Image (cartoon, rainbow, N blue to C red):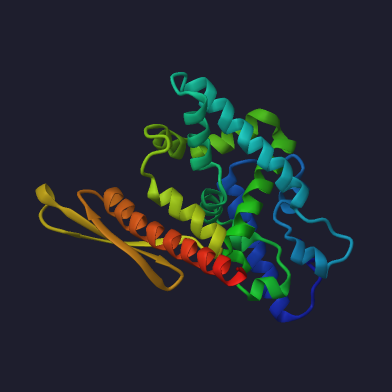
Amino acid sequence: MPSTTWSPASDRAVELTEHDALASLRQRVGRHFQDDALFTLALAHRSWCAENPGTESNERLEFLGDAVLGLVVTDHLFGTYTSLAEGELAKVRAAVVNAGVLAELAAELGIGPALALGKGEDASGGREKPSILSDAMEAVIGAVYLDGGWSAAAELVMRLLGERIAEAATGPGGQDYKTRLQELAAQRLDTLPRYVVREEGPDHAKRFFATVYLGEDECGSGGGRSKKQAEQAAAQEAWRALTTAGDRAASEDVTADA
């Protein structure tokens, strides 16, 4: 992480902000690290290391955390959902173990403000990039595993993903367009969907209307009897529009090459 001896006032202000964010993140992760260097290493992006020769990035921890995450979720699914076939188990796992979900978890935890980024990456919005956030989330899981073992890593993963797993398991491979859109947006646009919801009508007959944005662009809208239904409807419209646009672009590329 950045040195505490930096002299420029602007660098000192950034350092203090990152220190506060790191302390807050440590509380939300909920672990007192025996080796605190593991925690700071998990937040060291390669862009920061490029500006600080001789330092190590979080990429090795990311590699480890990816494997730990997958095994924790797989172990839980195998032991909990004994009636699900292999294909259904795989679909549930894919619904919760993907870059979009990990980036969302990282944003909820507040990983972005605590990252050690290079100045260029920081200036370009790196603290909000899903690819950077999802990688850091995996690195944090890897750090928890090294520091506290399987039980500590499993506790963290299930605390973060337990509800999502239960929701995905109720309809594996079904119409979870929020997850589909989240993953697609993270892969293609390196951004996360943002939902704006309004409600109308009396309590006994309330209707919800949602609009989903990717960046500043409105991409879909829909309604339902609950906030969840409205967001799913908006996500479905946006997902179909995004996949159609992607298919059209791929077709045009093939035609041009021919």
Residue appearing at x 84%, y 67% in the figure: 52
> Relative to 139, is 225 on the left or the right?
left
The N terminus sits in image quarter: bottom right
How many numbered circles are shown?
0
> Relative to 123, is 54 on the left or the right?
right
Is residue 32 in sight in this rendering?
Answer: no
- Kindly give the residue lying farthest to the right in the view shown: 54
Residue appearing at x 75%, y 52% in the figure: 59
Q: Quadrant of residue 64?
A: top right
| Residue 8 place in picture, x, y as percent | 76, 80
Q: Nearer the viewer, residue 251 or 198?
A: 251
Residue appearing at x 57%, y 29% in the figure: 74
From what the image shows, is residue 16 above or below residue 147?
below
> Relative to 95, is 257 on the left or the right?
right
> Relative to 218, is 32 on the left or the right?
right
| Residue 7 place in picture, x, y as percent | 79, 78
Q: Nearer the viewer, residue 221 or 46?
A: 221
From what the image shows, is residue 161 above or below residue 208?
above
| Residue 112 place in picture, x, y as percent | 60, 61
From what the image shows, is residue 61 above or below residue 236?
above
| Residue 163 place in picture, x, y as percent | 43, 37
- Kindly give the residue lying farthest to the front in the view shown: 258
Q: Quadrant of residue 187?
A: bottom right
The C terminus sits in image quarter: bottom right
Residue appearing at x 36%, y 56% in the figure: 235
Q: Nearer the viewer, residue 162 or 218?
A: 218
Is residue 74 in sight in this rendering?
Answer: yes
